[in-house]
Amino acid sequence: MGQRLEKYFDYAKQKGGLAAQMRLAMKFGMASNKAGAAPDTPDQLEKAKALCKEILGDANVPSF
């Protein structure tokens, strides 16, 4: 559970630092350390991807 969702949080941190990861957590409504336990639903994954695009200003966020 949550491995794919957790990858979006890791990606945000890798590309934008801790500040980007924290912004993702705030906008997503989940702490990054809780992402690994959350279900990888299609809605959750799409929301995380869209938020990464918005926060990082990167249209080429990979799908996990």
Image: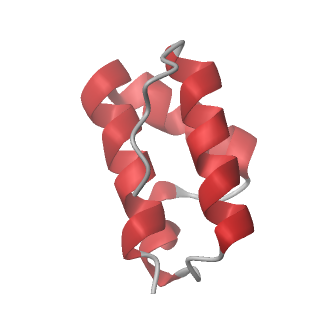
Q: Position of residue 55 (x, y in %)?
A: 58, 22
What is the quadrant of residue 1 in the picture? bottom left
Residue at figure coordinates x 36%, y 30% from the top left: 18
Q: Is residue 48 left or right of residue 36?
A: right
Residue at figure coordinates x 52%, y 36% from the top left: 22
Residue lying furthest left: 14
Q: Position of residue 7 (x, y in %)?
A: 35, 56
**Quarter of the image where the C terminus is located:** bottom left
Q: Is residue 11 left or right of residue 53?
A: left
Residue at figure coordinates x 60%, y 49% from the top left: 48
Residue lying furthest top: 57
Residue at figure coordinates x 70%, y 50% from the top left: 47
What is the quadrant of residue 6 in the picture? bottom left
Above or below for 34 versus 26: below
Q: Position of residue 58 (x, y in %)?
A: 48, 17
Above or below for 6 versus 57: below
- Nearer to me, 54 or 42: 42
How many numbered badges does the structure rendering display? Answer: 0
Q: How is the image coloured?
A: secondary structure
Q: Is residue 44 left or right of residue 35?
A: right
What is the quadrant of residue 24 in the picture? top right
